[in-house]
């Protein structure tokens, strides 16, 4: 991955975040059926060092409404914080 041009790596990370944001919008009313695409997006962000295991676990649980994430306010606040942190790391690490 270190041989790839930085703009390409940054673009892929941005696309991964877009996938997760689309998933979140779809999961606002009912739990999302999480797919390989969601796993791939989270895995890529983890692999690049832009997301931590905590980011990945929290976002996964938010999308599926697991545990306390069945509450809309809890989903909204945690998802927002996690994605914001990842986005900052994408911009810092991959630009």
Image (cartoon, helix red, strand yellow):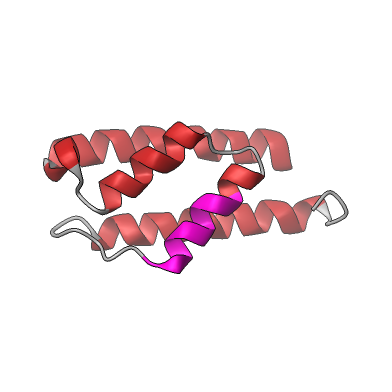
- Nearer to the camera, 12 or 54: 54
- The answer to whether 94 appears left or right of 39 in the picture is right
Picture layout, residue 11 above or below residue 66: below
Q: Is residue 76 visible?
A: yes
Quadrant assignment for the C terminus: top right
Q: Is residue 58 magenta?
A: no
Q: Position of residue 3 (x, y in %)?
A: 88, 54
- Quadrant of the rendered structure where residue 82 is? top left
Q: Which residues are magenta?
A: 35-44
- The answer to whether 18 appears left or right of 9 in the picture is left
Q: Main secondary structure of the magenta part?
A: helix
Across the whole image, how many numbered discs are drawn on residues?
A: 0
Residue positioned 52% across, 38% down in the render: 86
Q: Position of residue 28 (x, y in %)?
A: 19, 55
Residue positioned 84% across, 55% down in the render: 5
- Nearer to the camera, 33 or 10: 33
Q: Position of residue 19 (x, y in %)?
A: 45, 61
Q: Is residue 39 magenta?
A: yes
- Quadrant of the rendered structure where residue 77 is? top left
Q: Position of residue 62 (x, y in %)?
A: 27, 46
Extreme-right residue of the structure: 3
- Nearer to the camera, 88 or 65: 65
- The answer to whether 59 appears left or right of 41 in the picture is left
Q: Is residue 83 visible?
A: no
- The answer to whether 12 appears left or right of 86 in the picture is right
Residue positioned 48% across, 32% down in the render: 85
- Quadrant of the rendered structure where residue 79 is? top left
Picture layout, residue 45 above or below residue 51: below
């Amino acid at each position: 991955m270190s041989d790839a041009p930085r703009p390409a790596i940054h673009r892929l990370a941005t696309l991964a975040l877009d996938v997760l944001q689309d998933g979140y919008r779809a999961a606002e009313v009912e739990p999302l059926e999480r797919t390989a695409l969601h796993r791939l997006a989270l895995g890529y962000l983890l692999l690049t060092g832009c997301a931590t295991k905590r980011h990945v676990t929290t976002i996964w649980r938010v999308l599926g409404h697991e545990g306390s994430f069945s509450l809309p306010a809890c989903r909204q606040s945690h998802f927002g914080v996690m994605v914001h942190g990842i986005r900052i790391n994408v911009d810092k690490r991959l630009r």
